[in-house]
Image (spheres, rainbow, N blue to C red):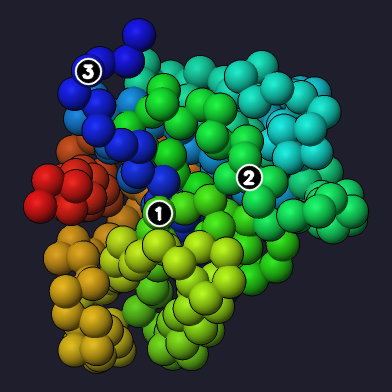
Amino acid sequence: MFHEEHIMTKIIAIANQKGGVGKTTTAINLSSALAHFTRRVLLIDMDPQGNSSRGLGIDITLINKCVFEVLTGDADINSVIRKTMLKTLDLLPSKLILASVDVIGNKTDKPFLLLKRAIEQIKKEYDYIIIDCPPSLGFLTVNSLVAANSVLIPVQCEYFAMEAVAQILSSVSRIQTTYNPNLGIEGFLMTMYDSKTRLGTEITTQIRGLFKENTFLTQIPRNISIPESNAKGLPVTVYRPNSSGSLAYFSLAKEVIDHEER
C-alpha cells in the first residue's frame, strides 16, 4: 500500500537527440541514486537499443515482452515491469522490436498518448518515473515528452553542444503547444566534464549564462568507473559507490529531490 504522504509522482524524461551525451548513463544512475535515497523509482527504457535495461543487468535477448507490447496493448504493464538489484528500483525493459512501434502506433487514434496511458495505471506505485529516450526526436521521444512532467537535458561539454540544445528546446516548445502544455525543464546537466579542457569550461559557462536557474550545480565528470559499471550491468552507485562518478549522481539525485521540496 503506498504511504499517505505520497503527493505526486514525478515523471522525468531524459532527452537529447544527440547520441553519446550520457543520456542512458544518467537514466540508470539517477534512478539508482534516487532509489538509494529510499525513493520508489521506475526506469522506463524507451530506446530500442535497450542499453538502460542492460545497464541494470537484464539480458534483453532473454525477455519475451518489453515496453513494445505495453505500448501496443498486447501486454499489461504490471506483467512486464521487472525488479532490479535495488529494492526500490523497477525497470520497464526495452529491446530492438521497439524500433517498429511507430508503424503500429500511428494506426491508433492518438499515437502520442500511448506511453502516457500506460503509465496512468501504475504511477501511484512510484515517487519517480525516469524515461530514457532514444537519441532522436521521433515517435518514441515524443511519446516520452507527452507523458513527462519535465525533461532533463544532458549536455556533453564539446563542440556542437549548443546546436543540440537548441534542437531539443524547439522540440520541447512544440510539445508544449500541442500535447503537453505543462512540460517543464527539469534542468540541463553537464556530462563528461573535464575541468582541464578549455572547451569544457566554455560550454559550461555558456549554458549557465543562458539557463541559470535551469542548470544543475552538479556536473558529471569523466570517470572510468562509469563505463566500467555499464559493462558490468550495474549502476556506478552500486559498483563503485565512492567513485567521483557515483558521488556526482548522488549529488544530482539530491538536487532533483530538492526541486520537489521547493
- Tell me the residue at 41%/26% (across/down): 124
Q: Quick one: quadrant of the N terminus?
A: top left
- Tell me the residue at 76%/24% (across/down): 75
- Mark 1–mark 2 distance (CA, rounded to whole Å): 13 Å
- Mark 1–mark 3 distance (CA, rounded to whole Å): 22 Å
Which residue has dot 3 on it? 4
Is tag 1's residue or tag 2's residue first in the polypeptide sequence? 2
Is tag 1's residue or tag 3's residue first in the polypeptide sequence? 3
Q: Residue at the top extreme?
A: 1
- Seen in the image, is 115 located left or right of residue 223? right
Q: Nearer the viewer, mark 1 or mark 3?
A: 3
Q: Nearer the viewer, mark 3 or mark 2?
A: 3
Is tag 3's residue or tag 2's residue first in the polypeptide sequence? 3
Q: How many labels were placed on the picture?
A: 3
Q: Position of residue 223 (x, y in %)?
A: 31, 56
Which residue has dot 1 on it? 149
- Tell me the residue at 38%/73% (across/down): 155
